[in-house]
Image (cartoon, helix red, strand yellow):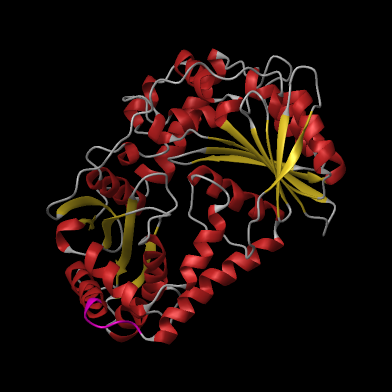
Amino acid sequence: MQHIRIIFGIIFASILLLVPISIFASEVTSVRTFLSHGVKEYRLDNGLKVIIIEEHKAPIATFQVWYRVGSKDEPIGKSGLSHLLEHMMFKGTSQYGSKMFSRIVQKNGGMDNAYTTKDYTVYFQIFSSDRITLSVDLEADRMRNLTIDPKETLSERSVVMEERRLRYEDDPQNSLFEELIAASFKVHPYQRPVIGWMSDLKSIERDDLYNYYKAHYTPDNAVLVIVGDVNPDEMIKKITHSFGNIQPGPPKIKVISFTEPEQKGERRVFLKKEAELPYLLIAFHTPHFPHEDSYALDVLGLILSGGKSSRLYKSLVYEKKVALNLYADYDGFHKDPYLFMFAATASPGKEIKEVEDALYEEIEKLKKEPPLEREVQKAKNQIESSFIMGQDSIYMQAMKYGIFEMLGDWRLIDRYLDSIRKVTGEDIVRVAKKYLKEDNRTVGILIPIKSEK
């Protein structure tokens, strides 16, 4: 499952307090605990980090395991390895047979799932709070005892290949998206799709998956996030007992840092495929959170397409009627710099060039004159309200802490919302001029063709 950007948030100030060391099991000498406004942070001796947030509004809890590995970490020629391994994590261990994990969860009234992104992989369950310790045993077991049966590997590889066919190769807009991303990045592994290229998927064998699993699915490369109706002291005792004697991974080879060279000219991609209407995608290279420009870029995205009263929707859909739908999106929640993207479907009878020209016209207007204060405030309110409403779901709370932890530290939550509030109209103009320029963009155009049938 591919990651879709979600705007998270919460309003709180972090004050870090040190709590004395506790000893819970003979296999683990110590666990350090930190308390910060309801957030308890622990670190086991094997490197496993644990974040627990008590939330007693309802008798439920979520247990999430975040592994710091995604598609950008895959060997060349093995794209899709992270996503396929995610599938195999449900195919059994030496203790529990194939598909038993999800059956046990469902039998106990819970739900479970997982997803893979370019930067990390997440597994989660939601249980009634009196059953949440099941997650501890189940996740600890598959962190170290995954079998990866060769027959299951071939079967699940075929499932993923079919998933790729349906979601990308048979979907013209998603096919264009893949082509655009591949053209936008020349060096960085973000160019590869999370689901993998078909030719790479065909080459993945059982040993590829097992070696990747042993190298990356280790306690020192993972974070547990638990939110809900739980007792932190009891949870950490259980976690220490189940996870504490799992050995850290092998010594890590120096992490390779990929730096995408500056783009010095527009790139264009054309895709001819069966479709009803022309489709446009445009990507501009931008920095990632917590770069100082990331907050203004986030607000800019909502000013341009934050609802049907936004600039692009009013201009291209309502007034000029050149587009049926469109969006602008800044996806800054990546480990490395990513993209600010625009997408639009041409209205029947309209040329895609009309859509593209109209979109550039709106961007140039924004560069010449700051947006109205009410536009800026509306966009900031949308971001903040999403943060606040996210607190109603224990799952979303855990997701929020996990994502910011993957980006560096969950305490970055505070910096994000505080910096969003400080964005001004002048900041919007500055980042629009700096990043939304011709030499920094890659354009993808879907050209509809008639069925050969």
Above or below for 139 versus 446: above
Residue at position x 55%, y 15% in the image = 151
Q: Is residue 3 above or below residue 443?
A: above
Q: Position of residue 300 (x, y in %)?
A: 37, 70
Task: Name the foreground residue: 206 vs 12.
Answer: 12
Please state the total of marks drawn on the protein image.
0
Magenta highlight: main SS: loop
Residue 343 sits inside the magenta stretch: no
Is residue 369 shown in magenta? Answer: yes
* Residue 107 visible in the snapshot: no
- Stretch in magenta: 367-371
Relative to 82, 17 lies left or right: right
Residue plotted at (47% across, 68% down) = 420
**Residue 138 image position (x, y, % from top left):** 73, 28
Q: Position of residue 412 (x, y in %)?
A: 53, 53
Residue 115 figure quarter? top right
Could you tell me residue 97's position as x and y percent?
Answer: 71, 19
Outermost residue toward the left?
Answer: 265
Where, by quadrant of the figure, is residue 373 drawn?
A: bottom left
- Whether residue 329 is situated above or below residue 158 in the rendered picture: below
| Of residues 419 and 434, the one drawn nearer to the viewer in this rendering | 419
Residue depicted at 32% across the width and 24% down the height:
77
Tell me: 346 left or right of 291: left
Residue 274 relative to residue 397: left or right: left
Residue 416 visible in the snapshot: yes
Query: In this picture, is 225 found above or below 101?
Result: below
Judging depth in this view, the residue of 293 and 20 nearest the camera is 20
Residue drawn at x 42%, y 54% as measured from the top left: 289
Q: Is residue 434 left or right of residue 64?
A: left
